[in-house]
Image (cartoon, rainbow, N blue to C red):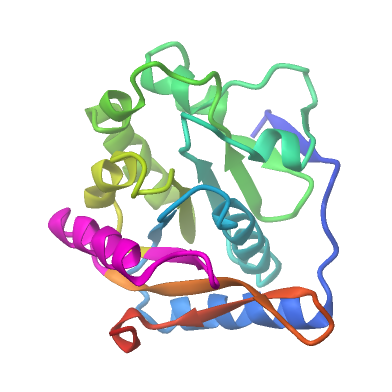
Amino acid sequence: MANQIIFNNLEELDYGQREAFNSLRTNLQFCGADLKVLLFTSCAPNEGKSTVTFQLARSMAENNKKVVLVDADLRKSVMLGRYKAQAADKKVGGLSHYLSKQAQISDILFATNIPNFDVILTGPLSPNPTELLGGPLFSELIERLRESYDMVIIDSPPLASVIDAAVMAPCCDGAVLVIESNATSHRMAVNVKKQLEMANCKILGAVLNKVKRDNSRYYYKYKHYGEYK
């Protein structure tokens, strides 16, 4: 792969955070070997979904899995700025370029400075993201990635805000809902769960995010969604 991106702002997790992501990684692997394409969504913005997807992909890559993270939030992506991603050739093609037929898959797929970890960034924000993500080119892209990677992780917009995640869900093997502790209502979470079910997407579980520990740091807790009533 010729394209390369360097993440210049990689957070060093403490022991508890690393173990939480390792636990999440292991639990997802026990969901079945046939689950290769995972969709992550949340109810509302700022629940930490993009951090969870990035750190999970990193954990899987460090476990010798070949992983690609697809940033599919064509409305308000934070990944490029948060991790200070910099392309070696100063040009960063993205998902919106491919879905609007301005680029090939090879133009938007980047290796990173994390071994086994590749990424597709969003590209320019799109005025019609739902139409692009629901089109045949997105399905074709996911099938191509499925053939080349051990795991494909898709970071999608909050489902209570826009329908994009439900549009992408039929291409995925399962979905995980990221929920911010003491912030997201039960009713909102149930509504998002119903939207995923209507899209015929298997719900693998939920990540309870931003749970405070005694030392005021945060960690991430995975639960099978069947435990939430």
- Where residue 228 sits, quadrant-wise, is bottom left
Looking at the image, which residue is at 86% across and 41% down?
8
The answer to if 15 sits in the magenta stretch is no
In the rendered structure, the answer to whether residue 194 lies left or right of residue 206 reads left
- State yes or no: residue 196 in magenta: yes
Quarter in which the C terminus is drawn: bottom left
Residue at 55% in and 23% down? 123
- Image quadrant in which the N terminus is located: top right
Q: Position of residue 90 (x, y in %)?
A: 77, 17
Magenta residues, start to end: 176-202
Question: Quick check: 88 left or right of 139?
Answer: right
Q: Position of residue 20 (x, y in %)?
A: 65, 80
Q: Specify the quadrant of the image occupied by residue 141.
A: top left
Q: Quadrant of residue 51?
A: bottom right
The picture places residue 121, in percent across and down from the top left corner, at 58, 33
Q: Nearer the viewer, residue 53 or 209?
A: 209
Task: Tell me: residue 124, above or below residue 170.
Answer: above
- Residue at (79, 36) in percent of width and height: 84
